[in-house]
Image (tube, rainbow, N blue to C red):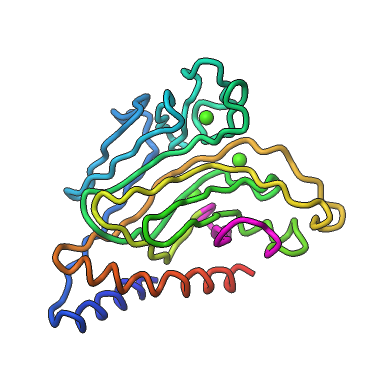
Amino acid sequence: MRWYVTLLALTAFQAIGQPIAAQAATFRFESSADPANGQAVAAKSVEGRTMSIAASPAGAVLDFRLGGLGVNSRGIDGATDPEIDKFNLLGGGLADESESIQFSFDAPGVITTLDFDGVKDESFEFFQLTTPRSGVWSIFDSQIGLRLIDITLIDEPNLTLLTEAGSPDDDLFGIAIPFAAGEVFTLTYREYAPDPSNYQPGFVPEAPNGARFQGLEVTFVPEPSAGLLLASVGGFVAALSRRRLRRNA
Ligand SMILES: [Ca+2]
Ligand SMILES: [Ca+2]
Ligand SMILES: [Ca+2]
């Protein structure tokens, strides 16, 4: 499963003639006792590395609880937020605006796992991840393949399908999304509306109801090797994306 980390380390080894000591860290967002609960911005430290998180739109706050991380926008004048503990589409004065977070890390590395919850296939809910070096990822439940005749007709960039088999649920493993220290990711909740002519016969979509971000795994890479490693990672991302689509097709 960690073949890509080994491959990247070997690539960097070849490039600079010395091994790289990568450091894995797991960030989880599933405790209501999290001191960042209710804050607009948060800093979470694991293994001596810090992840910074900020809620959007302006006026929203982060909501940590057992189910994962959500965004609470009920403090925004004129906006309506269906649920305080999920990412949602807002109503009222911010109708159809998405809740989102921005996040970054204080050291360079690679995101290797993303863990979500409640990304419903019958509703075509999805998360859009804007990355600093790997474009935009549109992350859907893999079961949309049972709802649509042709998922390639989805008009969103870099369609990526979550794992649904077994105990992992709404998760992405074996990915390699590189970043440098301070580079910002944006994670946005969205709801897709397929052309009904693409529905499988007899399928009736359900109303979307938001989703959560449970955590992620990161492999940090020490300087000065990070630049070489990040450069080598970029070439793998497109291939990994194609591999995921083939696997989940
Ligand atoms: Ca919300
Ligand atoms: Ca999950
Ligand atoms: Ca949902």
* Range of magenta residues: 152-170
| 227 or 221, nearer to the observer | 227
Query: Which residue ends up furthest to the right in the rendered image?
Result: 202
**Residue name at image x 50 percent, y 68 percent:** 241
Image quadrant where one finds the N terminus:
bottom left
- Image height of 194 relative to 43, above or below: below
Image quadrant where one finds the C terminus:
bottom right
Q: How many marks?
A: 0
Residue 219 lies in what quarter of the image?
Answer: bottom left
Task: Tell me residue 162's x, y (percent).
Answer: 55, 58
Q: Is residue 107 left or right of residue 99?
A: left
| 79 or 176, nearer to the observer | 79
Task: Tell me residue 6's x, y (percent).
Answer: 29, 76
**Residue name at image x 56 percent, y 25 percent:** 81
Q: Is residue 1 left or right of residue 191?
A: left
Q: Is residue 19 left or right of residue 84?
A: left
Residue 160 visible here = no
Residue 197 lies in what quarter of the image?
Answer: bottom right
Q: Main secondary structure of the magenta part?
A: loop
**Residue name at image x 31 percent, y 58 percent:** 179
Question: Is residue 165 one of those drawn in magenta?
Answer: yes
Question: Is residue 4 one of those drawn in magenta?
Answer: no
**Residue name at image x 73 percent, y 51 percent:** 194
- Image height of 131 relative to 123, above or below: below
Task: Tell me residue 231's x, y (percent).
Answer: 29, 71
| 50 or 101, nearer to the observer | 101
Residue 138 visible here = yes
